[in-house]
Amino acid sequence: MNAPTPPLPPEIPSHPAPAALLQALSERFGPRYSAALVVREQHGRDESSFSVPPPAAVVFAESTQDVADAVKLAAQFKVPVIPFGVGSSLEGHLLAVQGGISIDVGRMNQVLAINAEDLTVTVQAGVTRKQLNEAVKSTGLFFPVDPGADATLGGMAATRASGTIAVRYGTMRDHVLALEVVTAQGEVMRTGTRAKKSSAGYDLTRLMVGSEGTLGVITEVTVKLYPLPEAVMAATCSFNSLADAVNTTIQVIQMGVPIARCELIDANTIRMVNKHANLSLREGAMLLMEFHGSPASVQEQVATVQAIASDFGGQTFEWASTPEARTKLWTARHNAYYAGIQSRPGCRVITTDTCVPISRLADALLDSVTEVQASGLTYFLVGHVGDGNFHMGYLIDPDSATERATAEQLNSQLVQRALKLGGTCTGEHGVGLHKMDFLVQEAGAGAIAMMRAIKQALDPDMLMNPGKIFK
């Protein structure tokens, strides 16, 4: 079993940014360059619990050429570059663990081409998922990947994000058709096309999706769109026990019900959400579900799920069919993370997001809840349980070494359990800093060696977001 992860990974070499590089960046980017401490600190932290010095400077890119020029200058001085979207990552992806320059792509926020007849759209990397859906809604289409946070498409591609609706529509891996990427040498490369499939050479698009900025900086993304469903129905259902809610989910998936969302919140988290969002949800284990399709198919799905839930003691079904009611419901779910933080002012969160085969979900989840309850740590639990993915957030005092060690031990036990059950150490957060040791166990030494070889070939000076995925 792994030892608890310390606040900062050890033995990480730093690459100081020489004054000549900072001067060159200042001259090239003018007011879109900043070495101000407050700006650097903003770009030197994410939602993880790691404490790392900020980058040496920040460049605000507005075009692919800006990114290419910044990368070329950094490469000239052998200084790392770290892509930055909105800073919502949870595993330390954007931290400057070896120093370097942060390249903020948030201003690259143009929707470049909507091809409604082909069900595709091309955007700059800084476009967020909410902005994208607002831009395409008049076409009757939508982009389904919903990680909760209003993340950028570039960041979502880089971390292979998914979220609440992946049980029906899939993850970023399934939706990205093509990319524009700036390589470690500052060259602009395109991967893939708008065609739905291809057998042309290595699948470089899939190589970049999930690479967490370690192989290049994503600057454009082409993704699939889907027709807005004719009918949408959301529902909540409470259970007397967590086991009943989990077993209902397993049965729903094994029965082949094409449910669009199936989210789990435990009683502890419900209390936090009620207080944070001023709601009055029943304080018990709860499934939050959504059904998409024709009116007839939605009613059929609802009837099937209600019958299954009843077999496991499901009660107080409540329906939300209007857009306003559904939005309120899912906003409360997405804010569970912030509700947890608010429940303990001044805390930091150590999170995990294992994913297991659906038949082993109860084994993975229930034992993990028993362990954290026995530990005495404050926690929250949410899960995209329809696809076997769940998140545990351990709320710790950042100044308490004891609480940190306890949380990391619980995290380790949870991940080890998932791996033994045929699952993965991360369903959607990515590896970043936090899951490197677990990745070795999951993938094996041979696979890690192959990843290292790819990294070395594409980034021989190890300047693209170094210190992430593997040591």
Image (cartoon, grey):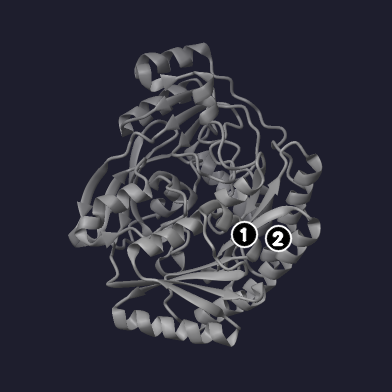
Q: Position of residue 454 (x, y in %)?
A: 52, 45
Report whether residue 435 is seen.
no
Residue at x 47%, y 71% (from the top left corner): 289
Front position in the image: 202 or 398: 398
Name the foreground residue: 454 vs 291: 291
Q: Which residue is mark 1?
A: 271
- Taking the image as shown, residue 56 lies to the left or right of residue 413, namely left
Q: Assess disc 2: are there few (<14), some (14-19) or many (≥20) residues with their C-alpha within 10 Å of its C-alpha.
A: many
Which amino acid does the dot numbered 2 rest on?
Leu
Q: x, y (%) of residue 236?
A: 49, 71
Residue labelled with disc 2: 414
User: What is the x, y in percent for residue 317?
Assistant: 49, 77
Observer-nearest of 229 and 31: 229
Q: Residue at x 31, y 61 (%)?
A: 198
193 left or right of 303? left
Q: Give the secondary structure at mark 1.
A: helix
The relative height of residue 34 versus residue 389 in the rendered view (above or below) is: above
